[in-house]
Image: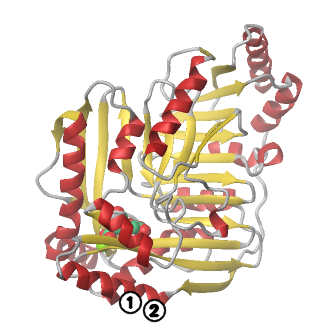
Amino acid sequence: MVTLYQNKVIDRLRDALTKKMNIVSVSMKVDEVDPLSFFEAGEKFFLGQRFYWSDCTNEYVFVGLGRTYVIQSDDQSKHRFIEIERKWKKILEGALIEREQDVLGTGPILFGGFAFDPLKRKTEKWINFPSARFILPSILLSKRNNETWLTVNVVDQSLEQLEEIIIHLFNGQKKQNNKDVYCLLKKEIEREKWIQAVKDVTSEIHDGKIQKVVLARELELMFNEQIDSARVLAALREQQPMSYIFAFENGSSCFLGASPEQLVKKEENVCETVCLAGSIKRGKTLKEDEQLGDWLLHDEKNRQEHQLVVDMICNAMNEVCDHVVVPQAPTLLKMRHIQHLYTPVKGYSKENVSILSLVERLHPTPALGGFPQEEAVRKIREIEPLDRGWYAAPIGWMDASGNGEFAVAIRSALIHENEAHLFAGCGIVAHSDAYSEYEETNVKFKPMLFALGGMDE
Ligand SMILES: C=C(O[C@@H]1C=C(C(=O)O)C=C[C@H]1O)C(=O)O
Ligand SMILES: [Mg+2]
């Protein structure tokens, strides 16, 4: 059964390559395979060149291996979004796309992300994560609802090797993981400086200079063993099933996480986005959990923090979409460790509105940057004691027709050998209390801490 795939794919690629196109993309339906096993099996040929993505409803799961194209931008302005789009269109102009059926989530799909603020001075650990970087993988496994598809994108590869690779991927045995992995060291980076920054920003907000600034901090963990991204992904998938689970490997680093926050999804002209801001921990009992949720729904500080996001996102969406629908009041989104105020927004894009133009328009929303946007980002650049890199920035995918989805890369960590850098931030508004905000970031570290093995629940 399995051998058939590689024969069929290779034959079609061989035919297509004779047409001398700049890139050839062939997709076919395959039997169900666990995407994580596929990711793991990819280690042999593609270590450092893999990505994983599943959305919060599990509609799409992608595993990308290898690099047929890398599209990058070092532009430090908002222009970087459109530059990626321009380069993507150029590649597609010379592409021969062969699909058994016109199914969303198959064919040439680009996956990647952006830096939160390219103007922030870059630190060594983010060296492999530029201002914008997207990959067209050599091999893509897509799972959409209950169907699994294989796409192979080649330029003019040796097809013999491809044959061996495909056989290996579909016969991948799950690694036995009996290693005892534990955390040796947990270090809070610049705790006092961060608390002082929160106090300073709060008083600037009181002075009326700015309305909201999101400030993040970092936790550094050291483990006894090298951290295996597949193991962490497996834990995230089990522990955070309602989140976007992502991993983006680059060389010896991997940026991964489980984010509850959608930035934007576009399917034809249907556009969706989410306002997520305002947080409290989960209760230990059902009663306590309901009380906390109820408190959050009525707390003035959290409602204001949330409303700034709703107003900005609605304004942005109304500029480029028709029939924008937004509920009157937020509801609660409950994740394993935290609950948030949640308002979904939906609209229909006007002509010539691309997914990356929506990303450009929205990023950073006041949930990750603040309000007004420019002043908030400048403030973060000036006083936040860390380089965010890709944390809190857009990460996601898009296809050849401009459909795709981006999440905001929060509840995330950058891993490198046996080190992990975790990031968490919170929205500072006029009524913020520095110590409560500090506690809020502690709750936001939990999903990654728990998945890595750096805490007991
Ligand atoms: C910045 C983070 O989360 C954001 C901030 C929130 C808040 O301050 O209430 C809530 C959700 C996110 O939009 C993070 O998790 O690091
Ligand atoms: Mg908050």
Direction left: furthest residue: 328
Q: Does dot 2 land on a helix, a strand or a loop?
A: helix
30 lies above or below 305: above
Circles 2, 1 touching at the beta carbon (< 8 Å) = yes
Please name whichever residue, 214 or 144, is drawn nearer the observer in this view of the structure: 214
- Amino acid at the residue labelled 1: Gln
Q: Amino acid at mark 2?
A: Glu
In-front residue for pair 332/290:
332
Is residue 440 in view from this perspective?
yes
Ligand 2 within 8 Å, label 1 CB: no
Q: Position of residue 219 (x, y in %)?
A: 55, 79
Q: Which residue is mark 2?
A: 192
What residue do we see at 78% from left, 59% from top?
A: 176
Q: Quadrant of the N terminus?
A: top right
Instruction: Give the image location of residue 131, x and y in percent.
Output: 55, 52
Above/below status of 139 relative to 221:
above
View quadrant of ligand 2:
bottom left
Q: Which residue is mark 1?
A: 196
Residue at (33%, 49%) from the top-left corner?
362
Question: What is the basis of the colouring in this image?
Answer: secondary structure
Badge 2 crowding class, 10 Å Cα cut-off, few under 14, some 14 to 19, many 20 or more, is: few
Left or right, residue 334 beside residue 249: left
- The residue carrying pointer 1 sits among few (fewer than 14), some (14 to 19) or many (20 or more) residues within 10 Å by Cα, namely some
Distance, label 2 to label 1, CA atoms, is 6 Å
Specify the quadrant of the image occupied by residue 231.
Answer: bottom right
Left or right placement of residue 386 versus residue 317 in this view: right
- The count of marks equals 2
Residue at the image point whose x is 58% and y is 59% from the top: 256
- Using the image, tell me which numbered label, if any, was put on residue 368: none
Q: Secondary structure at mark 1?
A: helix
Left/right of residue 361 with respect to residue 144 in the rendered view? left
